[in-house]
Structure formats: structure tokens, C-alpha cells
Image (spheres, rainbow, N blue to C red):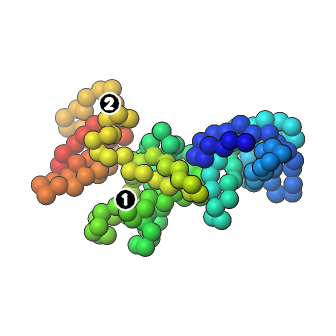
Amino acid sequence: MYLEMGSFNTLEVLRETDISFILGDETQEIFLHKKQATRELVAGERVEVFLYFDNQKRITATMKKPLIGLDQPGFVEVVDVNPRLGVFLDVGLIKDLLLSRDDLSFVKKEWPQKGDMIFCRMRASRNQLSAKLILRYDIPKYLKPTKDLVVGERYDAYNVYKTEEGQVFITPEGHYIYV
């Protein structure tokens, strides 16, 4: 059975246990905790589930849709900072996604802090999902403003780049603002 990690896959419900539904086929079984199911399931039914790795690097499933995907970036919130690892992001799943310190500034005081918003996407490797920043010059590929900003109005914007002279911000719609 071919499984695409970090994406939705259609799997068969094999059986139900006290705490989970077991999905898959005769060669592989995937755990779907009942708390991660959005409805009751029946053995033999085919169901769309998002696949990710749990803390023990096992493939596990959820019926909930994450805020970002492999090809679908978005703004997600920093929920924890670990100086040895990087920052953890709330992507709408039970497990937060790590943005590695390798993808952050060498200057730790410039790292995003808890509550900050980051524009990123998921990245799948052999045994984990992680976050990947969208470079500031690639943001227009994903965000295209439909109307101009109005002088004197207030807008939410997130810092995406720091220069010696100022800061580059972007609105959720994709407007660049230099301060």
C-alpha cells in the first residue's frame, strides 16, 4: 500500500477497538484514535484521512484538516520555542510542527516568539513532518492581493524580513509593507 505522508489518503476501516479505528490493508495497519475521527466509522468503509508521524515516528491518521499542507502554505502560530530544536507551530493537528533551528536566524533573539505568526508549509521527510518557511520572494506565488491598501487604514501584517534600514511585513492577503 502506497501512503503519502502529509497528505490525505483513502484507507479502508479494518476494525474498531476501544480507543481507535484500525485502517489499512492486509500488509499495513494505521492507527486512527477515536478523538481524531470526525464521525463514527464502520468496518469495510473507505475513509479519507490525513497521515502524519506520532511521537514514536509511527504513521498515524486523523480526519481533521491541518491549516497548512505540503503545497498549501499559510500563517500558523508559534506555540513554543526550544533553543536546541527550533520553534513549534500550531497547524491544527494534535501534534505541533517543528520549524527547525536550521531554518531560523543564527541570532536566537531574532527567532519568532510564542504568539508570532509564521508563513510556511509542511515538509515530509522519511520519518517526520516539519515546517518549511516560504521565502519572502516566493510569497507572491501563494498570496495575491485582490485590492489595494487604503492610506490611513489599519492592517494586520506579519514581519517576514529584517534589513539594516527597516522591516518587511506582509498582510494575510499578500500586500508587502516596508517600515
- Foreground: 153 or 177? 177
Please provide percent x and percent y for residue 131. Answer: 46, 53
**Residue sitting farthest toward the left:** 165
Res 103 label: 1
Mark 2 element type: loop
Please provide percent x and percent y for residue 44. Answer: 86, 37
Task: Name the residue rendered at 29%, 51% in the picture.
Answer: 159
Please provide percent x and percent y for residue 140. Answer: 31, 35
Res 161 label: none
Q: Is residue 154 above or below residue 83?
A: above
Task: Name the residue rendered at 43%, 73% in the picture.
Answer: 84
Image side of residue 135 versus residue 37, left or right:
left
Task: Name the residue rendered at 80%, 48% in the picture.
Answer: 27
- Examine the image and state in which quarter residue 171 appears: top left
- Examine the image and state in which quarter residue 151 appears: top left
User: Which circle, 2 or 1, is nearer the viewer?
Assistant: 1
| Residue marked by disc 2 | 145
**Residue sitting farthest toward the top:** 146
- Foreground: 21 or 27? 27
Q: Alpha carbon of mark 2 to alpha carbon of mark 1: how far? A: 27 Å
Q: Residues within 10 Å of mark 2 (few under 14, many from 20)?
A: few
Would residue 94 be visible to someone looking at this image?
A: no
Mark 1 element type: helix
User: As shown in the figure, which amino acid type bears the numbered disc 1?
Assistant: Asp
Image side of residue 69 versus residue 43, left or right:
left
- Foreground: 9 or 168? 9
**Residue sitting farthest toward the bottom:** 84
Q: Residues within 10 Å of mark 1 (few under 14, many from 20)?
A: few
Q: Which quarter of the figure is the N terminus placed in?
A: top right
